[in-house]
Image: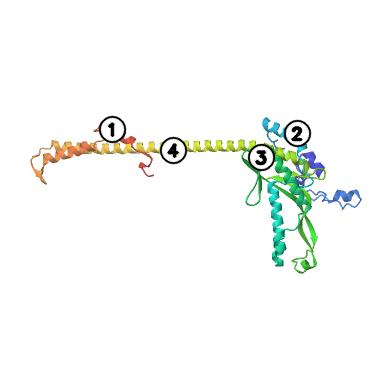
Amino acid sequence: MSRLAERYGISDNGLAKICRREDIPYPARGYWAKHAVGKAPERAPLPESGQPSRPITIYPTPQPEPPPDLPDDVRRQMEGIHAESSSMTVSERLVKPHAIIAAWLVDHEERKRRARQERDPWRKKLYDPGAFSDSDRRQHRFLDALFKAIERQGGKIRQGDRRELFGEVSGEKIEFQLREKHKETRRLLTADEQRWRIGNRDWKQELVPTGRLVFEIKTYLPSGLKCQWLETDTQQLEGMLPDIVAVFVAAGPLLVRQRQEREAAERERQLAERRRYEEQQRRKRDANRWRYFREIAEDWSDLAAVRDFLSTLRSMDIDRSIEVDGRSVGDWLMWAEDWLQRADPTASGPEDLFRRIAEIKEWSYRD
């Protein structure tokens, strides 16, 4: 399965999925190992199928795009740090530890002292941190060398309120973690656990340390920078120290550029949003002014009927000296003429008309 998958440019799991989908049997795990010693199980027959045969097309998995090249200044800086790798060594003994590690050691001793003074067995067990394991001491020595190497390059090492570690390079925070890798294994239940077990399983799955260290940068780094180092049987983490320091030093300027690009993009977005809002308000204000202009035109049209009505009244043969409510008919005609003049939107000329239209703002009308 692995050899065929490589030939077709896909994973062995992908090829197995195709076989299952097309109902094609394939060897189970361990088949070829048993076959090599003459103990292979019987070969599975092809299933009966009433459907006509058809071709199966396997498309190779597209290769991921290579990460972008690092800037020349950052690449040269990393090469310079690698050239100084001889000065970056992890000592066999912890001498004059970094302030953060020294504080850990003092806190550990203080907890042990409190545990010794405690008489309550339960609280004594709660307070007692136990002795440092070989892995703990090794991690202390590695971190001590890493902290000092980063600070020699101009960075700073900080510890958060929850004891999370991060470096400050070029003003940017780079959070990281050093831990021991664990693996899942099955352990037989003890006699006491057998009494309280649920089900038929006589084993328990748990994580056990492997002795291998893993260093991981938890801050998202720009493409092209490594963020995890796992030691193997042939290479220990101590030999990867120069590479880790180089990534820290290179990540600072790159994160600064990344942040500046984000800020510039955010400013451009806000500016575009502001322009969009202003254009929306301009359109709304213009629509409101046009609405007001139409209302004036409608009023003027209504006044035309009033003007015709008043003209008809003036042309009638009537005695204008007759009084109505203490005012003569002639005075009433002048009163109507005065109101008609004041209500005429064109009485003050176009300039005054458009000045009033220009006073219309966004919220002059409620939609």
**Real-space Cα distance between discs 3 and 4?**
48 Å
- Tag shown at residue 155: 3
Quadrant location of the N terminus? top right
Q: Is residue 15 left or right of residue 36?
A: left
As rendered, which of 219 and 37 lies closer to the eye? 219
**Amino acid type shown at disc 1:** Asp
Judged from this view, the residue extending furthest toward the right is 38
Rate crowding at label 2 as few (under 14), some (14 to 19) or many (20 or more) other CA atoms within 10 Å: few
Q: Amino acid at mark 3?
A: Gly
Amino acid under disc 4: Gln
> Label 2, on which residue?
83
Alpha carbon separation for disc pair 3 and 2: 18 Å
Amino acid at the residue labelled 2: Ala
Q: Residue beneath label 1, please?
A: 352
Q: Marks 1 and 2, how far apart in space?
A: 81 Å
Q: Who comes first in sequence, dot 3 or dot 2?
A: 2
Query: Considering only order in the chain, which callout, 3 or 1, is on the residue closer to the N terminus?
Result: 3
How far across and down, in percent of the image, does residue 169 sit?
65, 39
- Measuring from the top left, give residue 125's x and y in whole percent: 72, 63
